[in-house]
Amino acid sequence: MTSSLRTGVRPRTGVRPTMKDVAAAAGVGLKTVSRVVNGESGVRDGTAERVREAIEALGFRRNDSARLLRTGRTASVALVLEDISDPFSSALSRAVEQVAAAEGCLLFTGSSGERADRERELALAFCARRVDGLIVVPAGDDHRYLLPEIASGTPVVFLDRPAGGIDADAVLSDNAGGARRGTAHLIAHGHRRIGFVGDLRAIHTAAERERGYRAAMAEAGLPVDDRWVDCGPTDRARVGEAVRRLTAGPDAVTALFTANNRVTLAALHHLPAERRPAVVGFDDLELADLLTPGLTVVAQDPAALGALAARRLFARLAGDVGAPACLEVPTTLIPRGSGEIRS
Amino acid sequence: MTSSLRTGVRPRTGVRPTMKDVAAAAGVGLKTVSRVVNGESGVRDGTAERVREAIEALGFRRNDSARLLRTGRTASVALVLEDISDPFSSALSRAVEQVAAAEGCLLFTGSSGERADRERELALAFCARRVDGLIVVPAGDDHRYLLPEIASGTPVVFLDRPAGGIDADAVLSDNAGGARRGTAHLIAHGHRRIGFVGDLRAIHTAAERERGYRAAMAEAGLPVDDRWVDCGPTDRARVGEAVRRLTAGPDAVTALFTANNRVTLAALHHLPAERRPAVVGFDDLELADLLTPGLTVVAQDPAALGALAARRLFARLAGDVGAPACLEVPTTLIPRGSGEIRS
């Protein structure tokens, strides 16, 4: 790979220059090189200059991994997500990265794909690399496997969903409150028959949003027909089938609450052209305001969620030993048209 | 943080159990523990079982960082992106992650925010951690700073944009070809006055797409008025101003080629309601098919780009010493309505 470097440099492939090479090239002792590399005092200006020239000429770089290993810190944190390519996950990641960067830390990321075994595998692999701290968007519901890591001093903060089986810091959206407000918005526009299309019930956020929907219906004294509630995987086939079933026939619902970004996206592709139901979605989408009608959503704030989780993690690393807390980030109802269609 | 663990375990905070602790608990020698931990033979079943029980009871975990440091590999690779929260970047990241995971490698990610100094800082920080390999989406145009890393055996693959000043592997979209096809599509629908709204010209992909646009116009024998070409930052204010200028007055263009996802998004918010121009965008958007009219795009394949770059990196790690190559991934024109509006 280095055979055709355009610059004419002919470095020794595969061999990193050592401090010894620098010492030899600069005609000084190893200790002097070490002092210059680590910014310690006690080296004369002219000598330090010679050492720096040798470092530059040889392309010497300090091995941070080895150095950090000796300090007991790796200046890295890790984030286990559901899927980095999902816009919600990637916004979380960016926010965590920004806080980590301000703390001089690099970030590992890994996607669990909503699989508990992969979450565990990734989390433990990051811990085995001795990351200083870990943020986990849980796929599973039993996090006792992290107890030895927490016990030995690696703080763990859970994000988007709480930990299972252990008492740990968590940063969550106000899922139930947001769904309640979104459903109440539909009720306020005259709807009585409102369908709920959600994610798998085993997922904490999905269950919380269903709870919010049911709370709003109960507060308005409206019964919920069990056939109006459809929970399951978020693929287009299943969501499409749910939407078709809910919006057809004499018993059709007049409004839909779609409980996450993928459900909403799939549902929008399967709305009936006639007697179009009102729709409020949980999670904002990038072109939501350009649709006809605009898409009314209950927006989460992934940047705030990620930043809060990262700040919590660094507070723990800085020595905060207070009891684990669950921090909640508010959601925002954004009316744009689809949720204001009257029944 | 561990004071209120619900499980009743009272681990020693901040102290990781060592192999010595495991040996003492199991009543065996250190070498025996080491054999079990590293999966070596020569330990009787009953003894191995006792060691595994002690490992479980104490929560002992092998320190992969130290172990890997001795092998000279860290089983980690790093990806420097423009912005992990951008859908194109996050799709690249997911693809790289999947290839890395199949190779047993963890992934570091970092966002340069389109700043050359930050790209350099991140890339060198990852190298100082001795990542096994590096994938860079360049923000800057001079990558000679990576020569010492490449020389000492860390392969680097450039993604989305080529390296500057060094000869290195690169995986790119067919930017010029895609823009040419998109522009030719507008010409085929009767347009003669076609505006081009692009990113900063200093960015390789932006310059390539402008080249493709100009090539299509030249092939059709159409002159390009310099006022039709507007390049600059992708924020809404600047793109909005460009769209308003291009689509107003007697000299208005009848079609727009918007040269990346952020430009397209901003442009869609500023299209005139009357005499709506045809639009073809470079990059697909999640709700593009649900707009009215649907958005015609030249779609990139970020999953293929990321996977190809990662496979190239692992081929280098596996010993491929062939000359650096530039690999190109094709783009796809997806007609959905906005690009088929006739002049």
Image (cartoon, coloured by chain):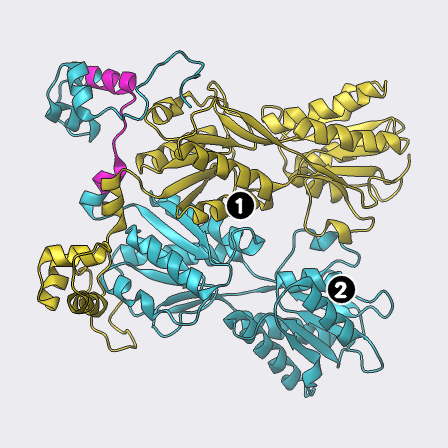
Chain colours: A yellow, B cyan
The answer to whether B224 is drawn above or below residue B116 in the figure is below
User: Is residue B292 found left or right of A234 in the rendered image?
Assistant: right
The answer to whether A196 is drawn above or below residue B280 in the figure is above
Q: Name which residue type carries label 2.
A: Ser
Q: Quadrant of residue B307?
A: bottom left
- Residue B334 seen in the current view: no
Q: Residues within 10 Å of mark 2 (few under 14, many from 20)?
A: many
Pick out the residue farthest to the top: B8
The residues bearing labels 2 and 1 have C-alpha atoms spaced at a distance of 35 Å
**Main SS category, magenta section:** helix
Q: Which residues are magenta?
A: B50-68
Which residue is the site of mark 1? A95
User: Is residue A29 found left or right of A285 in the rendered image?
Assistant: left
Q: Nearer the viewer, residue B102 or A85?
A: A85
Q: Residues within 10 Å of mark 1 (few under 14, many from 20)?
A: many
Residue B194 image offset from top left, x and y in percent: 72, 77
Residue A96 image offset from top left, x and y in percent: 50, 43
Label 1 residue SS: helix
Q: Nearer the viewer, residue A223 or A244?
A: A223
Question: Could you say which disc has been placed on residue B338 in the image?
Answer: 2
Residue B260 image offset from top left, x and y in percent: 61, 65
Q: How many numbered discs, if any?
A: 2
Name the residue: 58% across, 44% down: A303
The answer to whether B29 is drawn above or below residue A3 in the figure is above
User: Is residue A175 found left or right of A160 in the rendered image?
Assistant: right
B216 in magenta = no
Name the residue: 23% across, 54% down: A38
Whether discs 2 and 1 lie on one chain: the answer is no
Q: Quadrant of residue B242?
A: bottom right
Which of discs 2 and 1 lies nearer the camera? The answer is 1
Q: From the image, which quarter does the C terminus of chain B lie in?
A: bottom right
Chain bearing tag 1 is A
